[in-house]
Amino acid sequence: MKNGLQLFNSYTGKKEVFTPIHEGQVGIYVCGPTVYSDVHLGNCRTFVSFDVIFRYLQYLGYKVRYVRNITDVGHLEGDADSNAEDKISKKARLEQLEPMQIVQHYMNGFHDMMRVFNTLPPHIEPRATGHIVEQIEMVQAILDNGLAYEANGSVYFDTLKFAEQHGVYGALSGRKIEDLIAESRDNLKNQDEKRHPSDFAIWIKAAPEHLMRWTAPWSVGFPGWHLECSVMSTKYLGEKFDIHGGGNDLKFPHHENEIAQNYGACGHAPCNYWLHANMLLLNGKKMAKSDGNSIMPGELFTGQSPHLTKAYSPMVVRFFMLQSHYSSTLDLTDDALQAGEKGYRRLMEAQKLLQAMAHPGGGSAGTLDKEINAAIEQAFADMSDDFNTPKALASLFELVTKVNSLKGGQLSFNDLTDATLDRLKQTFNDFIFTIFGLQEENFDSSGDGVVDGLMQLILDMRQTARTNKDWGTSDKIRDALKELDIVVKDGKDGVTWTKG
RNA sequence: GGUCGGUUGGCCGAGUGGUUAGGCACAGCUCUGCAAAAGCUGCUACAGCGGUUCGAAUCCGCUAUCGACCUCCA
């Protein structure tokens, strides 16, 4: 199963065959959220993307260690030298709360949302504030190696020296250090503590009003944002691990600086493969919480947004995300969500039909049998080709048509074997639930089966009317349900219903 | 201004030298008490211009346009 997994390495810019450091094992680190406000949909897309990657690696049989951090200190607004303030510290000051209260509140919300989207929790979810000691140690190590310097209680990474020693700073993001000089030349006057404009803070002396502070050899202060990921990935995955992931927008400066820090402390890059998830767009523009252009997941689920005509369930949104490749931008529109909803339900309906099927026996491996097996293999090949979920879905939808045709009698069980049907069932279960992480939409908001029970009763009564050719009553029930946004579908052997 | 990446049919979105993406929408047919669902069929696109090639959506160049990053962002 592990054969031929390829992934696009952002560092080399090429699709490469995946070879883990340790046979059969994968260490993966994904940059998590900074918990200073509610998680927005763009964040969710990144974490859903890496959730599918995580799931597929596990499915392939790898023993995966998945680490995703929580940033709860060090993430600055503005430049470290010019009136910068830690995001969490600022929020705490504005709301007159203990910083850890802010952190806990938004971290809880983040976890809730990850659960709603059915993402698997990482194995380790380390927090920056829990690793201050290790961060101070890494700052010291980088200082000892001569790649950082202290200035007025703060410690800066010496990018120029790093570039001299290792040839290049900016390899991941394709930046040249000369350009970085030119870019920020105008701001040089504000950067008197830095020797070079592209240098970045790894330890920051706390201003008197700053709430989050720790004692370190250089000052009472707090760690730079980029440092935590170097420290925690190294601590939990080793000095060299397999895959590092994150949002595209973290490439520079965050990941670039992470690489520099790891060189500074360990003498080499942190990982073999860099994976970057692309942005979710809204109206053709990046969704970001810092400007107004964003939709909160909650607004999506209630439909309460000027961008939406109706509500969409979390699984519809997850399916919508799977319809594009993780490395492509995805433009969120109401039309696209509606299309996604229809497609998702078509897939799930077929899944239900398929799992309820029993082979009558005696089938032979004809053309149909071959086509089904080919589509199954194609779906796995698609996933192994840099986690191409949209392509894999296309393969599954070919199979959806086969399933529906078998059900409708347009195709015959005589043309496929019992074993192939079993394989098809297994494939659908594996893909839909294990790999894609989709779930049944739960229409029964009562949570105790009351709605399902009532619906069964109503549909039974309608069936009785239909048997008696009492079309008036039958249609009245159907129309009334439609008013409640419930669609009744009369199948050949039974009636089903869906909401929305 | 610099760097990088897009531009695919009515919409979303795969695809990188010759072969059907897929979903949604739309039209016709089949099935059905009617409708829905389902099946079948049709709609067959690749920003523009030029070049390479037997052959380009796919490679190269130019133009237009959109976006991301360069400052906090998944």
Image: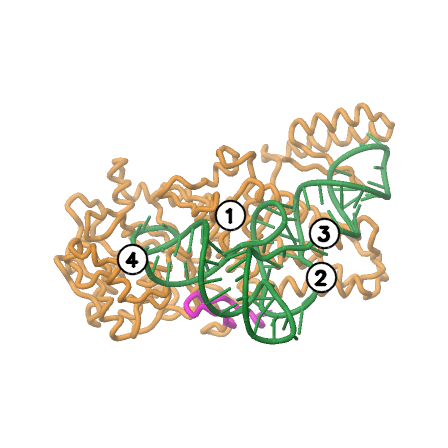
Which residue is labeled 1 in the image? Answer: A331
Q: Residues within 10 Å of mark 2 (few under 14, many from 20)?
A: some
Q: Which marked residue is nearer to the observer: mark 1 or mark 4?
A: 1
Q: Chain of mark 4?
A: A
Image side of residue A192 versus residue A96, left or right: left
Does A140 lie within the magenta span? Answer: no
Which residue is labeled 2 in the image? Answer: A423
Q: Chain B, which colour?
A: green
Label 1 element class? strand
**Residue type of the residue flagged with mark 4:** His
The answer to whether the residues at label 3 and label 1 have Cβ atoms under 8 Å apart is no
Q: CA distance from mark 1 to mark 4?
A: 37 Å
Q: Dividing the image into 4 quarters, which one contains the N terminus of chain A?
A: bottom right
Q: Chain A, which colour?
A: orange
Residue range in magenta is: A1-18
Q: Which colour style is shown?
A: by chain
**Residue type of the residue flagged with mark 1:** Asp
Q: Earlier in the sequence, mark 3 or mark 1?
A: 1
Which residue is labeled 4 in the image? Answer: A131
Q: CA distance from mark 3 to mark 4?
A: 48 Å
